[in-house]
Amino acid sequence: MSRAITTITPARGRNVELLLTALAIGVVILAYVNVSVAESGEIPPDLLGHTGILAAIALGVHLVLRWRASFADPIILPIVTLLNGIGLVMIHRLDLAAGRDFSSGLALRQLIWTGLGVAIALVVLVALRDHRVLRRYTYTAGLFALIFIALPLTPFGHSVYGAKIWIKLGAFTFQPAEVAKILLAIFFAGYLVQTRDMLALAGRKFLGITFPRARDLGPLVIAWLAAAAVLVLENDFGTTLLIFGLFVAMLYIATERTSWIVLGLGMAAAGALVVYQFASHVQTRILCWTDTFSEEGVEQCGQIGAGIMGMAAGGISGTGLGRGRPWLTPLPESDFIFTSIAEELGLIGVFAIIMLYALLVERGLRSAIGLRDGFGKLLASGLTFVLAIQVFVVIGGVTRVIPLTGLTLPFVAYGGSSLLTNWTLIAILLRISDHARRPEPEFDPASMDAPTQVVKAR
């Protein structure tokens, strides 16, 4: 006697994604209106034109997800759209304060970079049908990561504020280390999925810690040391910290050994002490961190003190969009855009920003947990930790939790390199989440002679 089985089609979440994305665009429109009213006392006549471009970009990503990744996480796109939109509004607000209109300001350039970043993300979503294909290019990704990191040391290198982290081709500048962080995540994931058992079990124990064999850990350490050495030569200590954090986080995830965190913190402290003895640039950063408001600290790094005073002026609820003076802090649209937001949106506003980042990290880790393959779990975790570490380093630097570095706040701060890379990272995460949430194929037990594949309903 056969039994009827009731199947439930798993929710794809695309309608929820569309609704949340529309809500995110609505928040951006409201913020844009607030800035214009505070500056000129009237609603901008070009409101629909400026915000409509961002809405069209987000809608384009949504439609491609419906077409190519219908089970992708429905929360990621709205979060990224809102963060990107808030960044555009704040950059536009700073343009107005500097006397620049939309056609000649930084906000238009940022919007163009957003469009290019989304275009690359869409290519990744369409071309990369299965994230496991990336495992074939484990060592290629590692090699190209080192090449990208070393590019600023070539004749094309360009120095900005003492850090040689850019390449310049005519009027075009780019920060290649941004691309390297994705390539290194692919390399670490591909290598660790092959050797994690050896790293976790094989080796000798010393002081209660099992150290893996040199031949197992060697390629990882060589890749990290080579990258770190080049970055130190370039005075790019922010990216050095980011890559080291990625290295330790992925080792811990792969081996599930807490000792790696202890060793990582010890290695970071030892490396920082050595670099501090020889690099005057690092000594200045430490001075700015420990004694910001001293006479020497104000002379060397007054931007940190100005940023802190700006955040203090914002208080709990902020001065209001368009009513503060964030331009008094140097680089208010890039390195210090967090303090600009904190001044005008207050503690409530920055808590909302931090919660958006926390939710984005949670969705990335949720995708990693839902995957059935080890490479995907490690890659999703690595890419998510790249975002988390970068946010912590940036916000920690401007609030004096840690010394200031040269990284920028993902999706919010002005900068084309960061936008292109982070939208690509999000595209890979969306592809991975589609694979994690997609029902698993299984054989139909009713047909044993000629089994056909059906979709498992959850």
Image (cartoon, helix red, strand yellow):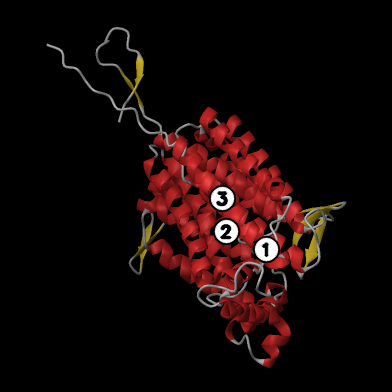
Let me know if residue 213 appears in the view. Answer: no
The location of residue 341, given as percent across then percent down, is 60, 67
Q: Nearer the viewer, mark 1 or mark 2?
A: 1
Q: Element at badge 2?
A: helix
The location of residue 235, given as percent across then percent down, is 70, 68
Distance from disc 2 to disc 3, alpha carbons, whole Å, reads: 36 Å
| Tag 1 residue | 37
Q: Residue furthest top?
A: 449
Residue for point 73% across, 86% down: 299
| Tag 2 residue | 243
Mark positioned earlier in the residue sequence (3 or 1): 3
Mark positioned earlier in the residue sequence (2 or 3): 3
The location of residue 337, given as percent across then percent down, is 64, 66
Instruction: From this view, report whether residue 458 is shown above or below residue 58.
Output: above
Q: Quadrant of residue 41?
A: bottom right
* Mark 3 residue type: Gly
